[in-house]
Amino acid sequence: MIVCGALGLCSLALVVRALDVQVIHNDFYLQQGQARSLRELPIPTSRGMITDRNGEPLAVSTPVESVWGNPKELLKNPARIPQLATALGVPPDVLERKLSQRSTKEFLYLKRRVSPEQARRILALDIPGVFSQREFRRFYPQGEVMAHVLGFTNVDDRGQEGLELSFDHVLAGKPGAKRVIRDGQGRIVESVDLIRAAQPGQDLTLTIDRRIQFLAHRELRNMLLKSGASSGSAVVMDVATGEVLAMVNLPSFNPNAVDMGNAEAHRNRAVTDVFEPGSTMKPITVAAALNAHLVTPDTRIDVSPGYMKLGRYTIRDHNNYGVQTVTGLITKSSNIGAAKLVARMDDQYYYDFVKNFGYGSKPGSGFPGESSGVLAPPARWSGTTKGTMSYGYGLSATPLQIARVYAALGNGGRLITPTFVKGTPPQSRQALDPAVAQDVMRMMQTVTEPGGTATQAAILGYHVAGKTGTARKFSENGGYTRRYLSFFAGVVPVKNPRFSMVVVVNDPDPSKGYFGGLVSAPVFKSVMDGALRLMDVPPDDIDTWMAAQAKAQHASELRGEDGPVLPDASAASAPLAPAAATATAGAVAAPLPAPVQGGLR
């Protein structure tokens, strides 16, 4: 009876306990069980693809695996740690130290973003507490050619620089989530339900044309090697739409590499770095004078004897150009002529005119780190500021700003906000009278014709409007050094403008030539020559092309060759500028005047 009674009491206790667990406190114990076995796992999603304007992939996401471990579980099997370390490619003591530091945790990344094959080899070792999960890694097929425009992502696939950062909210997508049941060893036993479906990132189509981008990168790189320059930038814009077709900076970096080198190379100099624009400012000064009806393109101005006092400084031209028309001031790039023109203008008028062209303001492209440049108001000017500003000293701008200004000159004076995303509605405003803009374009055309400072920018079959610039670099200790920035900014073709391009070459070796017409203009010519053909832009100078073709045919006949001969673009540019060799030789031999303040001696 005692034994039976004891067994009965035990049975009753078990029934009561079962009732308590299964009925009365069921919710509590269910929660405790789920806390130990039920897990919410993220569902990774792929980042949106970035393509160029023609649909060519520039940035794509590929699936990879990340190997992770449970430190608690791994530390229970210390004998397997060396084997795991070998598979991961890390020293055993380093791995053991990491696990010990996180001994109270249940999650630790062991190796991120490895190939699925490598992850499978690690998991095949069947080491308790080692697992993997799906992630995505960004890949950039164009490498360093597109690096500064695209930027890159971090290990968590979030944008860090460039357009990857600017449009991260569009490209990133939204990860999903699901509930799963894990066993005691952390293995997934069952998928319970889907909490939230993953939403892939949206694709982004850029205005960039990878073919023009490659051309700009190649030609700029070749010129840097040839001139011994330290860095350079180039920007190509569509005149009518403001679309950025190419943007290149050198030196560059490989966004696919884990260690992308010097962080200084990540900066997009074409957008963030400001320079004194040098003589590329002179067409704006001339446009201001024309707009105020102070002069006409044929107004004659005496710039002899080649130097002029400006305050306590003396400004100089490269040569004594005597009496020149306003057009000739641009053709010969006369500092004195620009200073004499701006002296006729009211300070506030000139400031407002330059400000209206976008100097001193961000271009508004949306690119991260975009700089506004420097344009001081008249209240902060000294006695020589306006004079030096007329030929590009005393203010600063980015290459993108200059390209935008020249695009406005080619677009009938309409200033358009640059954009990197195809399909963005253009935003623009009228900054200059269309008739004045056309006059300035015709005047800049003489720069690339015989007698101009940039005959090396001439393109066979097309009229080119442009302006060279050679600016001395400002010293941190005050004044200017004997190191240079070489510019060329141009628009092509003149009759129906399609492209605006700016080339900046920083710190070329003076012994190899440093004038903008010798260093930057050839880059413009090579890139635009290719871009005009790639985009099927009709020529606007058929007569010159036909004359060059006839000359090439005649030369072929003299050599006894048969068949039609098409003139080579580089060779055929010689008939356009018979005096180019002489002018170039003289430019190299003559030293640039040494400015003390704003291009002054």
Image (spheres, rainbow, N blue to C red):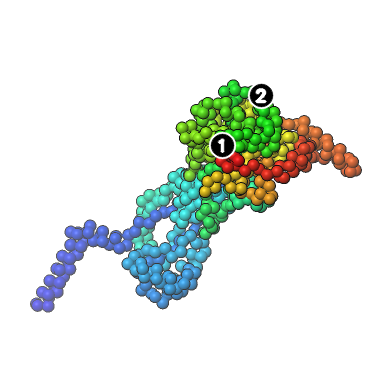
The numbered mark, 2 or 1, whose residue comes first in the sequence reads 2
Q: Does residue 535 appear to the left or right of 23 in the view shown? A: right
Tell me if residue 509 can be seen. Answer: yes
Find the residue positioned furthest to the front: 312
Find the residue positioned furthest to the top: 293
Tell me the distance, in whole angstroms, between the alpha carbons under discs 2 and 1: 28 Å
Q: Quadrant of residue 239?
A: top right
Of helix, strand and loop, which one carries label 1? loop
Q: Nearer the viewer, residue 354 or 220?
A: 354
Figure check: 458 above or below 158: above
Residue at image mark 2:
299
x, y percentage for residue 36? 30, 63
Figure check: 252 above or below 428: below
Q: Residue at x 19, y 59 (%)?
A: 25
Figure check: 221 above or below 461: below
Q: Nearer the viewer, residue 151 or 89?
A: 151
Figure check: 373 above or below 301: below
Residue at image mark 1:
312
Find the residue positioned furthest to the left: 1
Quadrant the N terminus occupies = bottom left
Q: Does residue 281 appear to the left or right of 570 in the view shown? A: left
